[in-house]
Amino acid sequence: MSREVFLLPDVGEGLVEAEIVSWKVAVGDAVVLNQPLVDVETAKATVELPSPFAGTVVELHHAVGDVVEVHQPLVSIETDASAPAPAPAATPAEASPAVEPIEQTREAVLVGYGVGDEGAATRTRRRRGAPAPVAPAPVAREAAPALAPRSTPPVRLYAKQHGIDLAGVRGTGRDGLITRADVEALLVGAPTPAPSRPPVTGPATPTRFVGHDLAPWASGPEVERIPVRGVLRSMAEAMTQSAFSAPHAAVWVRVDATRTMELLASLKERPALAGVRLSPLAIVAMAVCDAARHFPGVNSSFDADQSEVVVRRVVNLGIAADTPRGLIVPNVKGADRLDLVGMARALNALVDTARAGTTAPNDMLGTTITITNVGPFNVDAAVPILPPGTGAIVAVGRVAPAPWVLDGAVVVRQVTELAMSFDHRQVDGALASRVLRHIADYLEDPGPRLIAG
């Protein structure tokens, strides 16, 4: 028998750390090659890591909530030394070469390539207060490590700095939440006060904010600090880079989308399309791709380093997705080659994967133009910020009945608003206006264009 240590691989191009989201195995479990071991969250996505070894789990080196640097130990597995050498581990997206020793300066990893760091073996960071699980004898079966005591990240950090183990602290906040006052009471030797519930003056359910569950207004702390990491850090860096590197401008238009809605209603009645989730977003996506074919300059990016404008004649259509982890922008590769049914299926798969937190890093690379849909929030319009490396982003609002002048008479039609932000370094107002008008015309009468396309 031999003991193998699985190190955290670089699960995305150049990523340096990941957070443990959930363990799928416990100490004492028997695992087979490529069996899922753990879910980790990076700045781009949640990734499921498979086992590169077959054997018995003897140690989990980190607890849920820990932030681990690349090349640090994740799990130790006792293997049969006489068994054949394991094949390279496979990721959900593709199989890649097995992890090489960390002494190499550039190495094959589960996804992409990473830069080796000889000093990484001496470093690890634990940003939450949950203690790492203790490894018992290999033959003993234990339950999976418990979640960290319920508290907020600032309180956990404060407790860690003062040597307080939150596992033994009785929380006085709502539903047992451990507050800073609870930790301070232990530091001064005062007994923990009995739990008290303040009068509820607002909604009693938590809300989701930048991938974080915020306690209700009445029961949450007066001041709360949220660590900027993972998807939040990626979003903040990307939007800051875009806002301060690309001069933004915008155009917008109101559209009579009645025929679009009528077409969707008729298609949904067809038995052959019973399993296809058709939505206005699918037709907007078709319209954006058609506009790119007619005006390729909008499907471009500005390369400041090379002093070049890069025009692409393939559309990797980014879709801004609101997920429990925060805003991410995966894309549909080759969207301009899809018909309406293919587009609908691709969009549904993309959004479902994003909300499940299983978007692969590769799915967020190479976006050429983007759509953000604020209609589901019952909002009329938005002026969005460009994702870095793109030249335009289209925002579509809700489709709702509204007064509309048709043939000189005021009638009620299904109306939506479109807005497009663009990089004014290479896309001028005239081109942006033509593109947005083309999209609007497409939505006002999509039938002939879908047949022609």
Image: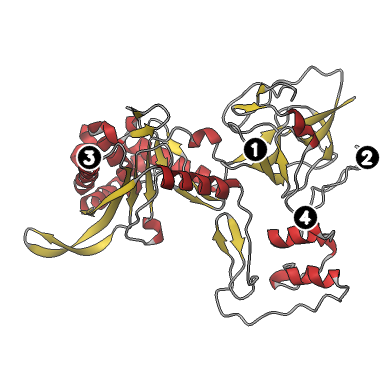
Q: Mark 4 near mark 1, Cβ–Cβ under 8 Å?
A: no
For marks 4 and 1, the one nearer the N-term is 1
Image position of 449 with respect to 174: above or below: above
Point out the frontmost of discs 4 and 1.
4
Q: Looking at the rendering, which quadrant does residue 29 occupy?
A: top right
Image position of 296 with respect to 329: above or below: above
Crowding at dot 3, Cα within 10 Å, few <14 / some 14-19 / many 20+, comes out as some
Q: Looking at the rendering, which quadrant does residue 223 occupy?
A: bottom right
* Left or right: where 46 falls relative to 316: right
Tell me residue 430's x, y (percent): 20, 42
Tell me residue 263's x, y (percent): 25, 47
Residue holding disc 4:
129
User: How far apart in space, not on screen, are marks 4 and 1 (Cα)?
Assistant: 23 Å
User: How far apart in space, not on screen, are marks 4 and 3 (Cα)?
Assistant: 53 Å
Residue holding disc 1:
48
Residue, far bottom:
199
Residue holding disc 3:
431
For marks 1 and 3, the one nearer the N-term is 1
Q: Is residue 226 visible?
A: yes
Which residue is painted at 28% across and 39% down in the image?
427
The label number, if any, that marks residue 137 in the structure image: 2
Which is nearer the eye, 380 or 275?
A: 380
User: How far apart in space, not on screen, are marks 4 and 2 (Cα)?
Assistant: 25 Å
Point out the frontmost of discs 4 and 2.
4
Amino acid type at image mark 3: Leu
Q: Is residue 270 visible?
A: no
Crowding at dot 4, Cα within 10 Å, few <14 / some 14-19 / many 20+, comes out as many
Which residue is painted at 72% across and 34% down in the image?
8
Point out the frontmost of discs 2 and 3.
3
Residue, far left:
408
